[in-house]
Image (cartoon, rainbow, N blue to C red):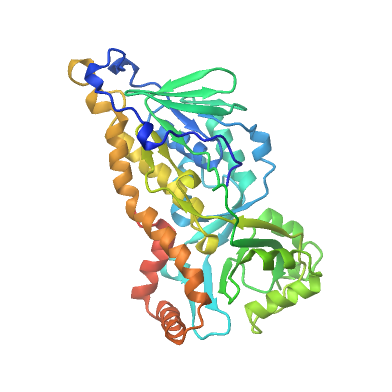
Amino acid sequence: MNAPAPAVGAPAAALPSANPAANPAAQRAGDAAAPLIIIGGGPIGLVCALLLARSGLASTLVDARPVEALQRDRRLLALSRGTLDILEPLLGTQFAPLGEIHRILVSSSGRPGAAQLGSRDFGGMAVGATIWYADLVDALARAARAQPLIQVQRPRRALAVRQRVHTVDVELDNATVLRGPLAIDAEGTPPQGRDAPQTALLAELDLACAPGDAIERFTGEGPLALLPLPPAQRAAALDGGAAAQGKSTRMSMVWCLPTALAQSRLGLPEAELCALIHEALGAHRGAPTGLGPRSTFPLLTHRRERVCEHRLVHLGNAAQSLHPVAGQGFNLGIRDCLCLVQCLEQAPLGAAGPAGTAPGSDPLRALHLYAARRRLDRTLFPALTNALPRVFASSLPPVVLARSAALFGLDLLPALRRPFTRLLMYGASR
């Protein structure tokens, strides 16, 4: 999630409603190919700019942070198969070290039922991968610098967005005003003004499991996820240890807990926290070792009902932020980018219309199509990620029985398992 930035949208009631035909300053077809303005130069903004360029559309990308600041960010991102399929044509197949995920082990602490989702249903293909945020930004920034249709303005902060009938103006902190037919909000500003009921406890550790395994363990306190690290980091962590002999794998832990509990566990002695993790994972697994530095991250979710506000469209975390239980938030944002560009391709910005007014080229037509196409994906995944922790935390006998049956069914019945795994890989829009 990107750092907070000034608000960049006008409320719906403040959007212009004048009749374009009565406006003598209406934008003509000759201006319709002006660069689209992308506010936010993190991964979502960069991917959007690269997809636009691949379709022949120019963009100006604005971000308050120098790229070097983003390259110091050591967060780990989970990429679905669908996201990898979008990134590889833009960046190449070897664009950064990836921790491939071939098998997702899903289970519930203290309850029967477990499921294995993964490459066994997809010809051995990795169903996802992990990547360091900094490595992804580096690859995307290099690709953007090589693309003549992308102009990057860093560090420049967007102070205001002013919408007109046929254009949108973005005022920058150096008194520059960018004007274009469309502004894309990819800032990812987190929700403000409320406390997080849950907090993610983050750490790295060594665990006995097969390379390529990811673990999703539902506990009574909250979901516990363990993801394989990209190989460069893993190799550095394993030097000289038992893991170097193939006995364990370096993993990234995300344990979603009530905020007070997460804060209390942040300072526990290593042995005590490892014992709690071992208890949560179950006695069939060896105890974790090599616990690294810990940190916490507040879990605040939100979802905009309207992602399009006249000539302003919100993508990624600017449109929705999800609970990390299924690792879908970033992937949902990448699908936002792809869908927006596909809709713009169907309503090209440069085609002249009757009397030189270019009605067929106005991106507003594309935004109506975009909002409709994204509705199912943006509704399903927030609902799913909000419901899963609650369902698996319940001790009501009917709920326990139903979820155990669901896990058994997913594991044993390919007719259930494959569509569900494909949904996690590609979303609801494929």
Please name whichever residue, 206 or 257, is drawn nearer the observer in this view of the structure: 257
Q: Does residue 231 show up?
A: yes
Residue that appears at 59% across and 44% down: 136
From the top left corner, tell me how far across and down residue 130 is, in percent: 58, 56
- Figure check: 320 above or below 285: above
- Figure check: 395 above or below 367: below
Relative placement, left or right, of 399 versus 346 is right
Please name whichever residue, 177 or 240, is drawn nearer the observer in this view of the structure: 177
Relative placement, left or right, of 20 versus 85 is left
Residue that appears at 64% across and 84% down: 284
Q: Quadrant of residue 365?
A: top left
From the top left corner, tell me how far across and down residue 227 is, in percent: 61, 63
Relative placement, left or right, of 260 versus 402 is right
Q: Quadrant of the C terminus?
A: bottom left
Please name whichever residue, 124 or 69, is drawn nearer the observer in this view of the structure: 69
Q: Does residue 60 show up?
A: no
